[in-house]
Image: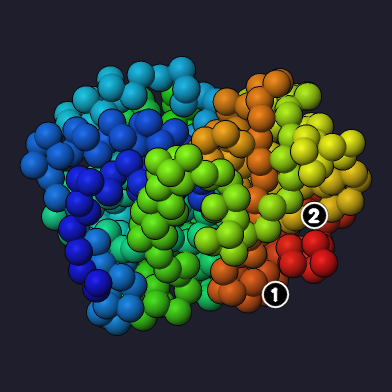
């Protein structure tokens, strides 16, 4: 299945899977649904290509929507999607990249797997008349643009054109610090309506194939179908997810405390869960920066970013958005190792800087694989 067209019948499964892989962020899947439904109503087609089938000399670019999930929830999805028919901020950012590089973009790859940030790249590709790549740069969602597999393979984040919600355009052409472009971007989107569209990681097809995390779209459809089938059969969707996807069930419980703030373009949250069933008398603590960054159970660290902790509604198996977490909510936590390309990246100095615990307030945390933390 090298090149294929997204089937309308797979949309529900896609959005469920993207919501799960979003690990709390990546944008609301219901916004993604508005985007996809609008495109289908206008006859747009999503052509999807697997990374290994991209030509070595192709010009590939990544990008997405930048902003805080908490800020975005105050906007009307319908109004924004409608406004994009007149002026699509992400299109402006990618056209700026083409001007800078003096070359037409051949393929687009989502920055992350998420309920908004994958569909928004799919609509961009459809509007530009080019394929979207069945891959991403994290295998999940991540809060900062330097948090990618690309940085471990010497692919530069810059130049990074960014257009905010009010139409202001900036370009970070170069930076001495890996985190500089993201920090500038957060400042711009905070001033410009809480949201922006950016283009980044201009690369060749050869660079793409050695660095990306494959399967963002197809994996999400598979997982979404698994959850829908479990719901249809009346079996436990979380247990089915754990078993069929070889996940690690870390915790099941009820939210007892949520302490959060919208700050600098991120929704920062500390969440406490009291265990239920097999986890009775245990406590879990989550640190979330749009997405789950770290998990402790009874004071012991059990997962460190970029390994995945998928937050699921215990009864439905649907992914939980971090901005929706409330006291009394029943949540299950399922962990997965990150892709081997990310693990390679974490051994490089760029990767250590990009993903380090200092980026979410825990500089003392050094990455340890989730399977070692849960022996």
Is residue 170 visible to us here? no
Q: Residue at x 69, y 52 (%)?
A: 249
Quadrant in the rendering for residue 203 = bottom left
Q: Secondary structure at mark 2?
A: strand
The image's mark for residue 289 is none
Lateral position of residue 45 relative to residue 180, left or right: left
Q: Is residue 251 visible?
A: yes
Q: How dense is the environment of label 1, judged by Cα within 10 Å: few (below 14), some, or many (20 and up)?
A: few
What x and y, as percent, mark residue 283?
Answer: 85, 37
User: Is 250 positioned to the left or the right of 23 in the image?
Assistant: right
Vertically, is 299 above or below 314?
Answer: below
* Residue pointed to by mark 2: 302
What residue is at 66 percent from the left and 41 percent from the top? 332
Query: Going 20% across and 45% down the picture, which residue do you hit?
Result: 8
Tell me the element at label 1. Answer: loop
Give the residue number, with chain letter if any, for mark 1: 347
Percent x, y of residue 93? 32, 46
- From the image, state whether disc 1 or disc 2 is nearer to you: 2
Q: Residues within 10 Å of mark 2 (few under 14, many from 20)?
A: many
Compare residues 52 and 221 and report the one nearer the observer.
Answer: 221
């Amino acid at each position: 299945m090298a090149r294929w067209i997204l089937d309308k019948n797979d949309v529900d499964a896609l959005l469920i899977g993207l919501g799960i892989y979003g690990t709390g962020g990546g944008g609301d899947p219901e916004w993604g649904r508005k985007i996809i439904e609008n495109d289908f109503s206008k006859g747009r087609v999503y052509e999807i290509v697997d990374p290994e089938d991209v030509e070595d000399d192709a010009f590939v670019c990544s990008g997405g929507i930048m902003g805080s999930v908490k800020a975005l929830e105050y906007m009307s999805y319908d109004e924004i999607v409608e406004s994009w028919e007149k002026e699509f901020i992400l299109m402006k950012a990618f056209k700026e990249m083409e001007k800078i590089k003096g070359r037409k973009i051949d393929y687009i790859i989502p920055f992350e797997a998420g309920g908004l940030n994958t569909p928004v790249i799919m609509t961009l590709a459809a509007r530009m008349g080019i394929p979207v790549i069945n891959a991403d740069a994290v295998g999940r969602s991540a809060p900062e643009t330097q948090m990618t597999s690309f940085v471990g393979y010497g692919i530069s984040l810059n130049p990074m054109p960014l257009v905010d919600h009010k139409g202001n355009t900036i370009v970070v052409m170069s930076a001495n610090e890996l985190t500089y472009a993201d920090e500038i971007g957060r400042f711009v989107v905070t001033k410009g309506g809480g949201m922006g569209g950016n283009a980044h990681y201009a690369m060749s097809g050869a660079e793409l194939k050695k660095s990306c995390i494959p399967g963002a779209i197809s994996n999400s459809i598979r997982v979404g179908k698994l959850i829908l089938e479990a719901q249809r059969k009346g079996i436990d969707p979380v247990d089915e997810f754990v078993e069929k996807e070889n996940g690690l069930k870390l915790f099941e419980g009820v939210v007892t405390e949520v302490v959060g703030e919208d700050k600098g373009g991120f929704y920062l949250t500390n969440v406490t869960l009291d265990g239920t069933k097999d986890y009775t008398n245990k406590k879990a603590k989550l640190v979330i920066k749009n997405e789950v960054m770290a998990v402790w159970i009874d004071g012991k660290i059990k997962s460190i970013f970029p390994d995945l902790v998928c937050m699921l509604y215990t009864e439905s198996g649907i992914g939980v958005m971090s901005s929706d977490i409330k006291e009394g909510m029943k949540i299950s936590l399922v962990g997965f190792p990150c892709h081997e390309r990310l693990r390679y990246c974490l051994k490089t100095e760029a990767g250590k800087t990009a993903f380090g615990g200092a980026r979410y307030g825990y500089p003392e945390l050094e990455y340890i694989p989730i399977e070692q933390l849960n022996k």
